[in-house]
Amino acid sequence: MDNSSASASGNAEFELRVRQALLSAKHSIPQLAVLLFAFKQSFNCNNSRQTALNNSVLIRLRGGLRDSDTVSLLSNGHIGILLQSVQGPRDLDLVISRLLTRLAEPLLIDGHEVVLEPRIGTALFPEHGDSVRSLVEHAENELNQAKNNTKPYTAYSSNPRSLFTSRQWMSELRQAIVTDQLFLTFQPKVSFSEERVTGVEVLLRWQHPEHGVIVPDQFIPVAERTGLIIPLTLWVLQQSLLQCRQWNDMGLDISIAVNLTMWNLEAQELPEQIEALLRDTGVPPKNLELEITETSIMSDPQRVIHTLNQIRQLGARFAIDDFGTGYSSFAYLTKLPVSCIKIDKSFVQSIAADRDNSVIVKSIIDLGHNLGLKVVAEGVETVHAKKLLRVFQCDEGQGFYYCRPIPADAMTKFLLQPPLAVKERLFAAESPETEAVKLAEDYNPKVPNLVLTTSEKPNSMA
């Protein structure tokens, strides 16, 4: 793309916007990103057609960005995009994916169909530089690499070594999926009022032949960037539902919760795939709960709501995971077909010692109940936290206090006959009490003094 007259001032304007954003980012905004787009096109254009093509591309890109972002046509024929506030590499990948989707459909210019082949270079502040020049140069280098590759852009990498590591992980993760190196663990959710296990959350693990057990935080980002997250999630769903069916056949009416990522919610075929899995496994849809995060909801709210409604019509349920750590979700909370919110463990773990966090937790519980939602507290690790959550009328708890994530066979034994230490905890409210929990009195003066038994200690089950 090139149109010198239309883009003569593009460079100066774009660099000015980047410079202004850098000044702001150094004081308040965590990250910003610079993207450079170059295009191959299916036919040669004269000046008038080139101008029309440039305008059409700019309109499509503009439609996939926020009002605070900048898109400019540069003098070298490239298009520059400034993302004012980026939460990290995953956020950047999501934006690029959205823009590529908008550019995938051919353009119609003077009766000619134009197919674009975009190539993209990216740079993140502060990882790749703290000046306009350093960020633009890094994006140009990435763009040149992308021009020589089959993929439109290179997934985020802070240095060449980490890029190599990502590629290596990608290859090994593919093998892990087909060679049974992956396995599931389960963590129970306990009702505070009924003192019983109501469901379990599924947590994925990777038994690597050389590195041992690997937790999701180390390989899920690679799966998301490479597209492996789609088959990986389907595998987790299938195995989870098969296990749930086994428990149901044993007379255990247990629901099972599986996490979905923003990439899963972007897949249009997801509702049909879930419907097929429920049909094939014979699990009642009400026993499947799908956990989504505030960030995944806000990636494309209208599309996400449509997808969630389709799945909800099947009978499956939704919970918002890590509630309280995202942003801008309150406006959409009443529109989402969710039945539960899960308070992020970062608030719950310090609830007994940090009054501010206690206020936040109590407020979230009240908000959830006022909206008719069940509220689950994650990260319950002490009896102090458990008793405060009961005072706050939280519905369920989940955390190491009750049980660590354990494999399926161990969870089966747990469900059939909970270990003695856990039984004592499930009925701790009936035990002798000797030490008052002061925070509880502050929030509800009518509640009797809540006390702790000195023998109660965190659960040691691994």
Image: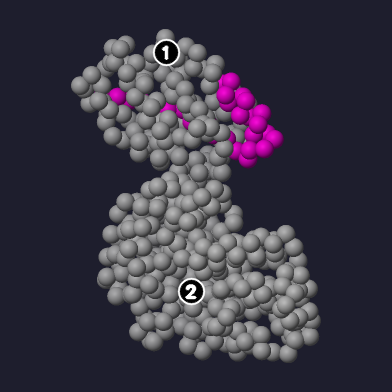
Q: Is residue 226 left or right of residue 439?
A: left
The residue labelled by disc 2 is 200
* Residue 371 point in image, percent of width and height: 51, 63
The residue labelled by disc 1 is 6
Q: Earlier in the sequence, mark 1 or mark 2?
A: 1
What residue type is disc 2 on? Val
The answer to whether one can see residue 38 in this image is: no
Give above or below for 69 relative to 291. above
Q: Residues within 10 Å of mark 2 (few under 14, many from 20)?
A: many
In percent of the image, x 60 and y 35: which residue is there?
A: 125
Magenta segment includes 27: yes
Judge by depth and name the residue closer to the eye, 44 or 60. Answer: 60
* Residue 122 point in image, percent of width and height: 50, 33
Give above or below for 161 relative to 44. below
Where is residue 250, by image quadrant? bottom left
Magenta segment includes 18: yes
Where is residue 429, by image quadrant? bottom right
